[in-house]
Amino acid sequence: MNKPESASYETAVLVLLTLSRGANSRKKILHELLSGPKNCNQLSKTTGLDWWTVKKHLLNLMKENLVKSSPFGNAKFYKLTPLGEEVINALYTSNERHPVSNT
């Protein structure tokens, strides 16, 4: 991948997780996935977001290769990709605090 593509991808992820509407919700979802795979219902309960909102954010995160899904019976579980782990850890480091905290 050359520099311009990399820079535009990094910009897209930055906007997705910091500047866009819904960024805090996406960061909450990524944070919850740090502890391991979860399905939509589990993410909805732990983040306080409704199921449909979680599903829409997961689709956006999957498009950016930050999250991937795996079927398990009738359920679908979501987990961080290596890139997703790298991004959420970078957010922790750059913020020097919890990326989804209100302080």
Image: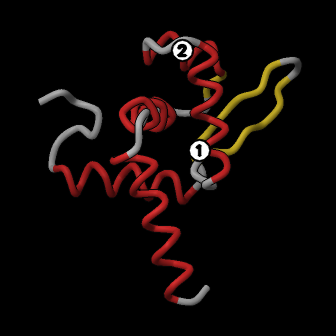
Q: Quadrant of the N terminus?
A: bottom right
Q: Residue at x 69, y 44 (%)?
A: 68
Above or below: residue 95 compared with residue 53? below
Q: Residue at x 57, y 21 (%)?
A: 53
Which residue bears the numbered disc 1? 61
x and y percent of residue 87 in the render?
42, 56
Which residue bears the numbered disc 2? 44
Q: Residue at x 80, y 20 (%)?
A: 75
Above or below: residue 75 compared with residue 6? above
For the residue pair 48 and 82, the one nearer the viewer reads as 48
Query: Is disc 2 placed on a helix, strand or loop?
Result: helix
Amino acid type assigned to the residue bearing label 2 in the image: Ser
Q: CA distance from mark 1 to mark 2?
A: 15 Å
Circle nearer the N terminus (1, 2): 2
Q: Residue at x 43, y 65 (%)?
A: 11
For the residue pair 16 and 73, the one nearer the viewer reads as 16
